[in-house]
Each structure stands twice: as structure tokens, then as C-alpha cells.
Image (cartoon, rainbow, N blue to C red):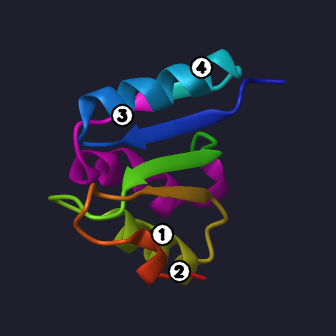
Amino acid sequence: MANPRALISVGDRDARSSIAASLERLGWTVIAHASGFHLVGALAQLIIEGSAAPRTDLIVVDAISPGCSGLTIAAGFRDLGIDVHVMLVAPRARVPVGAFRVT
């Protein structure tokens, strides 16, 4: 069985590196992207082709970011019925992520 696959787009380089290293130590294959916009480009195949696209098990993305926020990505997957775990990373001292709920 292949390693689980995570896509990461976190603007803070140190946080992105730390998250990627932690996931890799746990056996994940990690693919990092420069912004939410770049992440959505990489996810286009999953969005358009569904199960025919390369498997994605986890998306780690800034809750609020230029290009496309994690909140928008999570809501879009929910609306499309695509079952992918999305972990939102809170911006430091701007907006508490607990204020948002995507179900």
C-alpha cells in the first residue's frame, strides 16, 4: 500500500517545514505548494476527475491566504461531495479559526 499523500500550502516557511517534516516522519508523502492559489491548481485534477485523480488523503492549508483560502477550499470540497480531510492553519493573532465552522 502506498504512503498516505498530503498537500501543504502554508505561508509561514518555518511552520510549513515543521508540518512537512512531522508528516514525513510518520510516513506521509508530502507535496508543498507556495500558496492556496497554487494548491487549487494542483487540486484541479481531483476536483474535475474525482476518484480518477491521484489520491489525496490530507490538505494542510492556511485558513486565510492570498489566492484562495483554506476555508474556501474546505467549503468547496464539502459542496462538491469530495471526501478529503482539510486541516486549516490559523493565522497568528488575526482571526481565531474557532470562529469558523465548515461542516
For badge 1, the amino acid type reads Ala
The x, y position of residue 43, in whole percent, is 42, 51
Residue on which the image places disc 2: 102
Q: Nearer the viewer, residue 48 or 89?
A: 89
Mark 2 residue crowding within 10 angstroms, few (<14) / some (14–19) / many (20+): few
Instruction: Check disc 3 and report its element: helix, strand or loop.
Output: helix
Closer to the N terminus: mark 3 or mark 1? 3
Closest to the camera, between mark 3 and mark 4, is 3
Instruction: Check disc 4 and report its element: helix, strand or loop.
Output: helix
For badge 4, the amino acid type reads Glu
Closer to the N terminus: mark 3 or mark 2? 3
On screen, residue 93 above or below 60 = below
Magenta stretch: includes residue 39? yes
Instruction: Check disc 2 and report its element: helix, strand or loop.
Output: loop
The x, y position of residue 40, in whole percent, is 33, 54
The residues tagged by marks 3 and 1 sit, at their Cα atoms, a distance apart of 20 Å
The residues tagged by marks 4 and 2 sit, at their Cα atoms, a distance apart of 27 Å
The residues tagged by marks 1 and 2 sit, at their Cα atoms, a distance apart of 7 Å
Closest to the camera, between mark 3 and mark 2, is 3
Residue 99 placement, left or right of 86: left
Q: Nearer the viewer, residue 79 or 20?
A: 20
Over which residues does the magenta segment extend? 31-52
Quarter of the figure that contains the N terminus:
top right
Closest to the camera, between mark 3 and mark 1, is 3
Residue on which the image places disc 1: 74
Residue occupying the point 70% across, 20% down:
27
Residue on which the image places disc 4: 24
Residue occupying the point 37% across, 59% down:
90
Which label was assigned to residue 15? 3
